[in-house]
Each structure stands twice: as C-alpha cells, then as structure tokens.
Image (cartoon, rainbow, N blue to C red):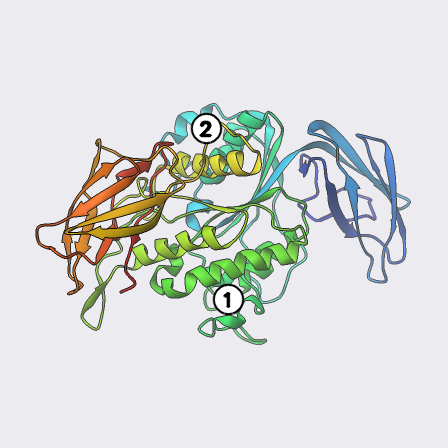
Amino acid sequence: MLVAARAEVKLPAIFSDGMVMQQKTKANLWGTAKANKQVLIVTSWDGKQYRTKTNALGKWKLSVATPKAGGPYTISFNDGQLTTLKNILIGELWLCSGQSNMEMPMKGFKNQPVEGANMDVLKSKNSNLRLFTVKRHSSFLPQDDVRGKWQEATPESVLNFSATAYYFGRLLQQMLDVPVGLVVTAWGGSAAEAWMTADMLKAFPDAKIPQSGDVIKSKNRTPTVLYNGMLHPLIGLTIKGVIWYQGEDNYNRAQTYADMFTTLINGWRAAWHQGDFPFYYCQIAPYDYGIITKKGKEVINSAYLREAQAKVELRVPNTGMAVLLDAGMKTGIHPRKKVVAGERLALLALSKTYRFEAVSGESPYYDGFKIKGDTAMVHFGRAPMWITCKNGFESKLFTVAGADKVFHPAKAWVVRSRIYVKSEDVPHPVAVRYAFDNYVDGDVYGCNGLPVSSFRTDDW
C-alpha cells in the first residue's frame, strides 16, 4: 500500500500510522522503492539515521533500535521524497492466530454472544491499546502483504475485534502499564495444516499439499493456504510472542495433533529467526460433538484432542496452555466466556514472560498414579498449594476401569496434594480417567483457581 500520495517508498500495511513496535529490541522494517536506490530512515525517539539500499527488485530491509515503552513517535523514510509514519507507540506487540474462537469478535456471532461484551465495549477506549486485524486471504503462493489497518481501542473498533485477543491485551496493558499492540490473523474453521508450509507437513502424509493448477476447494482447510496468505507477509515482524486458539477443526484426527502442533510452533519460530519466542495457546473448550463410532465403538474425539494439546506444553519450551475445561458450552462450539480465555492467556504471559512472581498462570497437570488395594491415588504436577474441587473436596467426573477396560463412575476425593479414586464396581482398578468426554464442566482446580485438564492414565 502507498503510505503517502507521492511517496516512492512503499511499506506493507502492518507498517503504518498508529502502529505499535516492540520495545527495547532491534525491530525489523522493510518495504520497496526504486531499484538500487538509497533510502534514509530516521527514528524520532533518538534522532538516529539509518541508511540502506534497495536491491535490483527494489526491496529493502533493516532493523532499528527501539527504546523503552513510550510515544507517540514518528519514523521518516526518504529516497528523495519524504514519507513519514506518525503516532507510533513503542511497547509490547503480540500476534494472535487460530480459528473461529480467536476470530470471534466482541459483538459475537449471530445467536452467539460474548458474555459481558456490551459493557466491556462501552468502557474500551484506550489509546495505549492498538488493534490490527488481517483480512481473510487464502493463497497457494506466499504473499508479500496483508490487508488491514491499525486502530486505537475505541468502542467502535473493539466491537469488531477478536474478543479473546482483546481481553488478553486489555489485561496486559493494565498490568504492564505500557502500550500493547495486537495483530489478529485468524480464520474460523481453519485446520492447523492450513497454517503450515509444505516442508512442515512432510511428516504428515495425510495432508494433501496443493499443486500448481489445483483449485482451492476449502479456503480455510487446505494445507498451506493460510500460512501463505495471512502469515507469510507478517514473518519477520518483531514481536514479543504469539497466542493461539485452534484445534476444533482437528478434533477428528487428534492422533496427529500433538506432533503437528509441535511442528507448527517450531516451524513458525524457525521462519521468524527470533528464537523461541513465547507461544501460549488455549485448549479447546468442551462441546458436545455427538457420539462418533468406529467399528461399533464410541470414540470421544474432543477429549483425545485436548489430551494431544496438553502434551505440547510439556515437550516444547517457552509454551503454555490455558485450560478451558470449565468454560465450554454443551450446545455451542463458540463459548461465551471469552474473558476467561483471554485473561488465562494473559496470566500465562504475565507469569512466564513478564515474571509477575506473585501470580501463576499454569494449571496443575496429571503427573502419575498408584494403586493401593481398591483405590487409585492420582498425583499432580505444578500444584504447590495442592488440589481443590469446585464444590469442596469431591469430584463427580472420575471413572475407573479394571482389566476388562470397562469404565465405571467413581467416587473421587482430595487428600492433601492427591485425589483418591475408587468404585465398588471395580475392586481391582487398572486405569483412571477424569472428565474424559466431549462435554464436561470441569470441577478440579489448583489453588490458583485454574482448572486441571481432562486426562487418562491408560492408552486404550
């Protein structure tokens, strides 16, 4: 896009008036001008001058040193004609991606509201919170630019902005007291495969990579097309980290998701050349997908997908999972409690990235079990203050099975840091499951108020 009517220097849409740049780093800028032309760049916060020369295609790229949070500032670009970006803030910049539960705006979808959004939109004016939404675009070929514009948080702009991302950014801005920028690139119903490259998908032969001349049959599920159209133009943008809310489209192929999501995270980080930046994600919320059978046996797909998601934070460094086991809807795949999703992601960032030591953003997790007689004793990690339940010290969501692999409802109660589980129908327990179903309302928590994910001790 042209940022000034007569300017020779052209910048991608993400570099425009009102943008937020990551503080205290070397922040990348790039664009185009005439071929083999010198471009002079001046940053107003320190008056420093940078010079670069375009290549034979007219492309240029460099990085500028950013100060601690503040602004507004300007950046000028001069190749003989002057272009100036205005109202730039320096602060914390996060990329927000995924499918419909990331895309879902504060105004909700038709018949599907966001809880509390009306009052939150009313109170949302904040010039230190800046929003950018990437327009949907699906492409076989890597693109160089996106469509979108930077906006300050106002009731009008927030109304149409991602609710999960807004609540994440609002809490970050309040607690850090610095400008925060949010770039949302998300598409409802999108598969994880659509956000990956062909190289990333080599290990997953079921992902059919489109070939030249193919017709895109699904604009949001075809492998590589959203990476090319909505992520590739942003790669290299200097960010603090990523938040992600996706998985519902992969619920029926959960067996590959842990490996695939691990590959996606590592692939994005490799492409960015910015080290292992923080990558925080939501576990999909419970929803009644209905009974799905294979060879006459019931398959509880969404529980397996949640299980796959839970594996990733323990195998990939600098990641974290926001558990939403208590924030789903039985008859709605778009939960209303977006403030829960956004703020739990923010708690992960505040505690793990920004080192707020007084709070915790991580849920306890299943960490093994032992059998003693007719009772199973379940252990948990990340539970320094032990475990509690929604209604005191008992959970209604445990089942146990013996060697016959038939699960029965069980009595489950908390004793200090463990949960004891038993059933009169299973005198010799072999396996335990918690909340391992499509739809549940989780009732086991850490003392930090964060729910434990559904889990199973078996691999049946």
Q: Residue 353 location, x and y as percent?
A: 56, 38
Q: Residue furthest left?
A: 424
Query: Does residue 294 appear to the left or right of 1 in the view shown?
Result: left
Please name the amino acid that badge 1 sits on. Answer: Pro
Residue drawn at point x = 67 percent, y = 38 percent: 22
Q: Residue 404 location, x and y as percent?
A: 15, 65
User: Are there few (<14), some (14-19), or many (20+) residues within 10 Å of tag 1?
Assistant: many
Q: Quadrant of the C terminus?
A: bottom left
Q: Which mark is residue 121?
A: 2
Query: Does residue 227 appear to the left or right of 307 in the view shown?
Result: right
Q: Residue 294 location, x and y as percent?
A: 24, 70
Query: 423 or 352, which lies in front?
Result: 423
Q: Quadrant of residue 381?
A: top left
Query: 266 or 282, which lies in front?
Result: 266
User: Are there few (<14), some (14-19), or many (20+) residues within 10 Å of tag 2?
Assistant: many
The kind of secondary structure element at disc 2 is helix
Which is more N-terminal, label 1 or label 2?
A: 2
Q: Residue furthest front?
A: 372
Residue drawn at point x = 8 percent, y = 54 percent: 425
Residue drawn at point x = 37 percent, y = 41 percent: 364
Residue drawn at point x = 88 percent, y = 38 percent: 49
Q: Is residue 454 above or below residue 300?
A: above
Task: Identify residue for label 1.
Answer: 223
Please name the amino acid that badge 2 sits on. Answer: Val
Query: 54 or 397, which lies in front?
Result: 397
Whether residue 331 appears in this view of the structure is: no
The kind of secondary structure element at disc 1 is loop
Q: Residue furthest top?
A: 123
- How many angstroms separate mark 2 from mark 1 (CA)? 35 Å
